[in-house]
Image: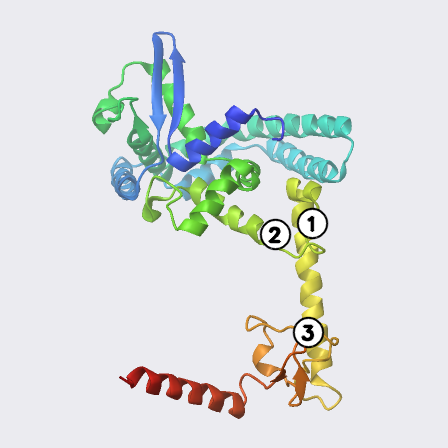
Amino acid sequence: MKDLPFQEIEVLLESVISNKSLKRIDYPGGTEFVIFSYPKSQDLVLSRYMRESAMLEAAKEGLPTLEEATELVDKATTQEDKDKLKELKEKLVAQEAVFEVTAIEARRDQVRENIERLQEEATKLENKSQHLLYMSQERKADEESFLYLAWASAYAVTGERFWSTFEDFEKETRQEMRLSFIEMFSKFNIGLSSKEIRFLARHSLWRIRYTAANKTGQQLFDNGLVDLTPDQLSLLYWSNYYQSIFEMMPDEMPSPEIIEDDDKLDEYMDSYFKNREEERTENKAADRGKTGRRSKLSAWDKGEELIITPSHPDYMKLAYSKTRVKSAEGTSEVEIISPNSRRARNKRQRATSQAKMRGGRR
């Protein structure tokens, strides 16, 4: 996606942020503009109601359940078609494995074409008897729910619903326009791919907003938390993922080239966390000592100058030196004691008591 024009990136990002996507529908009778907006929580609840109602109606009509329809499909499929479909799926798995290990782009294009051809053949073979599944109660109910969401997500450019009521949408007589609209909503409803979301999450156009919102506490999206869309939730997840990478120590952070490549980055981070886990396991084993009991970690075990902050997992277990040592500037002496020792607790208690006494004086 590096070659994507800047303007297209901006449009893509704005559609996620605002939850609004402008679509142009051309059909034999003219052109319509529709703004899709992912349905709110109330619409999602109503779509479930539409599904349950449709299930009851389908059962009254005597339609088979999905399980019963699947059995009909199995009986209607010949053994020859089953064997052919199995062979196609095995070839697909093999070609996908080849694609993963192929580095030469020309060769990857050839393998990609093979995958698309095999997928097309498998789909055609499956569709020979799949029409029986569309007669099931569940499929009819799913279609009713989907159409309701399509209606609820469509707005005119002036702001109101594109169709005032769901009944108006069902009575739409412009069939070509209606079919194009449903196809567009289906793509919109699927949302962006993981590759597209990850690209946006690390792009400067989004990172500026993300960083500013984190620092100022401002809202990132037009809709509230309860109505965040799947794309918005996914963008937040991957933003946090990349933020943790950008905050890694310089000698541990992957190169920019690796960060830009999703597969290479995932492999790098898997290896990184695996190595960290192995280091923790080794440290725990060494920490137990020869006696088999866990010993305290000395503040000076890893060198002369060691700084341990309260966020360190072993901060409260450190055995500090009890001798006086020179400060960094050499101007005074400081005493290093364990933060959880009795002596440290007494010091904190005395300091608190003295502060209260000073506060009570007039």
Q: Secondary structure at mark 3?
A: loop
Q: Secondary structure at mark 2?
A: helix
Q: CA distance from mark 1 to mark 3?
A: 26 Å
Left or right: 127, with 351 as reference point: right
User: Could you tell me the amino acid type at mark 2?
Assistant: Ile
Residue 63 is situated, as x and y percent measured from the top left of the image, at 32, 36
| Residue 294 visible in this rendered orientation of the protein | no
Q: CA distance from mark 3 to mark 2?
A: 24 Å
Return the residue at label 2: 245
Q: Which mark is residue 254?
A: 1
Return the residue at label 3: 306
* Residue depth check, mark 3 versus mark 2: number of the one nearer the observer: 3
Rendered residue at 65%/32% (across/down): 84
Rendered residue at 22%/23% (across/down): 168
Residue 126 is situated, as x and y percent measured from the top left of the image, at 54, 31
In the rendered structure, are the residues bearing label 2 and label 1 in contact, judged by CB atoms less than 8 Å apart? yes
User: Could you tell me the amino acid type at mark 1?
Assistant: Pro
Rendered residue at 52%/51% (across/down): 240
* Residue depth check, mark 1 versus mark 3: number of the one nearer the observer: 3
Residue 318 picture quarter: bottom right
In the rendered structure, are the residues bearing label 1 and label 3 in contact, judged by CB atoms less than 8 Å apart? no
Residue 128 is situated, as x and y percent measured from the top left of the image, at 52, 27
**Residue closest to the eye, 38 or 283:** 283
Density class for disc 1 (Cα within 10 Å; few <14, some 14-19, many ≥20) is some
Of label 1 and label 3, which has the lower sequence position?
1
Colour scheme in use: rainbow
Q: Vertically, is 204 above or below 129?
A: below
Q: Secondary structure at mark 1?
A: loop
Q: Quadrant of the C terminus?
A: bottom left
